[in-house]
Amino acid sequence: MPKSYLLKVVCPDQSGLIAAVARSIAESGGNILHLSQYTAVDIGAFFMKTQFETQEGFDVGAFEASFSSLAEGLCMEWKLLDKSRRQRVAILVSKTHHCLYELLLKHQDGELDCDIPVIVSNHPDLASVATQFHVPFYQVDPGKGKDAYEADLEAILKEYGIDLVVLARYMQVLSGDFVSRWERKIINIHHGFLPAFQGAKPYHQAWAKGVKMIGATAHFVSDVLDQGPIISQDVLRVADTRSVSEFIRMGKDVERKVLYEALRLYLDNSVFVREGRTFIIQ
């Protein structure tokens, strides 16, 4: 049976990169199905995402050894992914359910290529939603102290073999140590158009400034609040006559859309990070 792999490459831009990668895949017996690449000329960085198919007998170890030698000479950062392996995603929530529902419904409809084996919250409010979708629900207690509470959270993530954590309006700040252990493995939805209106109550901040647009931002979590590399954003125009409560109500639709899109892009392996910013290569 044919098997499909995806190769992600980031390296300094130079002549012959596409040919070198294509030759390496071909010599291993692989057949390229899709290739997309981009060069960020302002920083001299080359990005490439290549999906290829192999026949029975393909030696993954031999390919990795051969490609590693090529990559070393070209200063490549690279990753080979088995397309048949589904990412395991944990969703963290507090009391607000609109983003959680969006992800679960999209997953149920087959629009998110992953498994969602667990939902974790610091409140009991959304347990019924998890039950509705037949997903195990756990409540953690930040009141125990950050170290103890995060140890409980880590134990749950380990138990379910989690690859990626999604903060779907999870209203807790994770410690720098936790974020470091899960670097580029935590996606957060912020109900503001970053880098403006960081931190708490961004809709209130936006209203006070008389903005004409409100937005939402999905980003990787970093050790600096709301400063991680941005994956997806969108905005909505608002009239000056709208109240803060109307901002909040209207913003929910943007939040749903942006978080779903960020997760979809991540699962599609379309997100590259270089020098603290993202490049989406589809």
Image: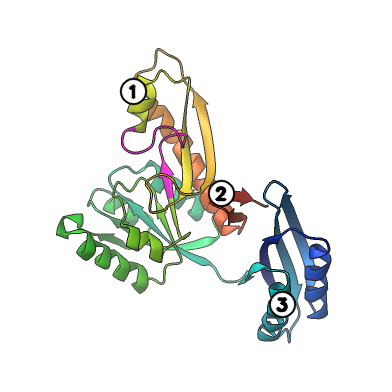
Binning the other alpha carbons within 10 Å of mark 2 as few (below 14), some (14 to 19) or many (20 upward) gives few
**In the figure, is residue 93 to the left or right of 273?**
left
In the image, residue 101 lies in the stretch drawn in magenta = no
Q: Position of residue 23 (x, y in %)?
A: 83, 73
The CA span between labels 1 and 2 is: 31 Å
Disc number placed over residue 277 in the picture, else none:
2
Residue type, mark 1 in image: Val
The residue range painted magenta reads 188-201
Residue 111 in sight in this render: no
At a point 74% along the width and 69% down the height, the residue shown is 52
Residue 226 in sight in this render: yes
* Local secondary structure at mark 3: helix
Q: Contact (CB < 8 A) between labels 1 and 2?
A: no
Q: Which residue in the protein does label 1 denote? A: 244
Quadrant location of the N terminus in the rendered image: bottom right
Q: Residue furthest left?
A: 144
At a point 42% along the width and 49% down the height, the residue shown is 188
Binning the other alpha carbons within 10 Å of mark 1 as few (below 14), some (14 to 19) or many (20 upward) gives some
Residue type, mark 2 in image: Arg
In the image, residue 195 lies in the stretch drawn in magenta = yes
* Local secondary structure at mark 1: helix
At a point 42% along the width and 67% down the height, the residue shown is 162
Q: Which residue in the protein does label 3 denote? A: 67
Binning the other alpha carbons within 10 Å of mark 3 as few (below 14), some (14 to 19) or many (20 upward) gives some
Q: Contact (CB < 8 A) between labels 2 and 3?
A: no
Q: Position of residue 142 (x, y in %)?
A: 20, 56
Q: Position of residue 113 (x, y in %)?
A: 55, 60
Disc number placed over residue 87 in the picture, else none:
none
Q: Position of residue 71 (x, y in %)?
A: 70, 73
